[in-house]
Image (cartoon, rainbow, N blue to C red):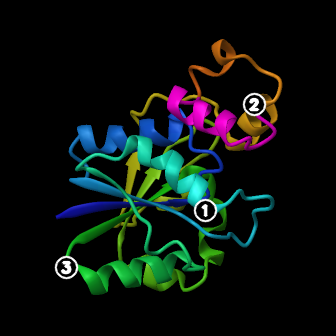
């Protein structure tokens, strides 16, 4: 089975995250996607509780979109991929944004990561070809409808914006959860 692995902080999850997941499943690039919110991140500050981030992701769970609750404490991507490989003999496709290509060579145990397929989600402002040219394990996903959405901007908007201003970038159930649990000043 071809399994996408989408690791991130999802602080909070937004519509572009799920557009990516649905697109690669619907276009038969992978059979299913495991979404893995991380407990911590070496470059992230102010992450809300992992259980809240998992609960928000659970609104999207289907038989093809799996929200992982067992690998969240692994610090590095290579550890996540190693753990998954020990559990099942699937073919794994790491999902990354094109912005990650710039520093991918600096990732911990990059050689282990590159043993897998890498799905690169294209962004208009990045020249992906210079990073993936001649590398068979990289697959560029360039036909994805792109929106300029970031969790950082959503966190800033939550305390001041109306639902109508947020409805195209964040799921109503996720927004309701944020407000009910007073997350991000909502």
Q: Are marks 3 and 1 in contact (CB under 8 Å)?
A: no
User: Pointer 1: residues within 10 angstroms few (<14), some, or many (20+)?
Assistant: some
Q: What element carries label 1?
A: helix
Foreground residue among 148 and 83: 83
Q: Is residue 181 magenta?
A: yes
Residue plotted at (32% across, 44% down): 24
3D distance between C-alphas at marks 3 and 1: 28 Å
Q: Where is residue 122 in the image (x, y as percent from the top left)?
A: 50, 43
User: Pointer 2: residues within 10 angstroms few (<14), some, or many (20+)?
Assistant: some
Question: Which label sits in the foreground, 2 or 3?
Answer: 2
Quadrant location of the C terminus in the rendered image:
top right
Foreground residue among 108 and 105: 108
3D distance between C-alphas at marks 2 and 3: 41 Å
Q: Is mark 2 on a helix, strand or loop?
A: helix
Please state if 174 lies on the left or on the right of 162 as rendered.
Answer: left
Quadrant location of the N terminus in the rendered image:
bottom left
Q: Is residue 101 magenta?
A: no
Residue plotted at (43% across, 74% down): 70
Q: Are marks 2 and 3 in contact (CB under 8 Å)?
A: no
Q: Which badge, 1 or 2, comes first in the chain's sequence? A: 1
Residue 101 visible at all: no
Quadrant location of residue 158?
Answer: top right
Q: Which badge, 3 or 1, comes first in the chain's sequence? A: 1
What residue is shown with label 3? 89
Q: In this view, does 91 lie above or below 8?
A: below
Residue extending furthest toward the top: 164
Residue plotted at (64% across, 33% down): 149
The stretch of residues the image draws in magenta is 170-186
Foreground residue among 77 and 113: 77
What residue is shown with label 1? 50
């Amino acid at each position: 089975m071809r399994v996408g692995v989408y690791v991130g902080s999802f602080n909070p999850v937004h519509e572009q995250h799920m557009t990516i997941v649905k697109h690669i499943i619907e276009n038969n690039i992978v059979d299913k996607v495991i979404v893995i919110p991380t407990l911590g991140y070496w470059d992230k500050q102010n992450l809300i509780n992992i259980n809240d981030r998992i609960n928000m992701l659970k609104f999207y769970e289907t038989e093809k979109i799996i929200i992982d609750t067992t690998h969240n404490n692994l610090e590095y991507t290579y550890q996540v991929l190693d753990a998954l490989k020990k559990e099942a003999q699937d073919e794994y496709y790491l999902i990354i944004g094109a912005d990650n290509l710039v520093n991918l060579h600096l990732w911990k145990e990059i050689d282990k990561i590159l043993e897998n397929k890498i799905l690169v989600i294209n962004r208009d402002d990045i020249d992906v070809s210079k990073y993936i040219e001649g590398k068979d394990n990289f697959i560029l996903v360039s036909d994805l409808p792109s929106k300029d959405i970031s969790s950082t901007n959503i966190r800033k908007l939550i305390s001041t914006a109306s639902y109508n201003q947020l409805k195209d970038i964040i799921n109503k159930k996720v927004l309701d959860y944020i407000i009910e649990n007073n997350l991000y000043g909502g």
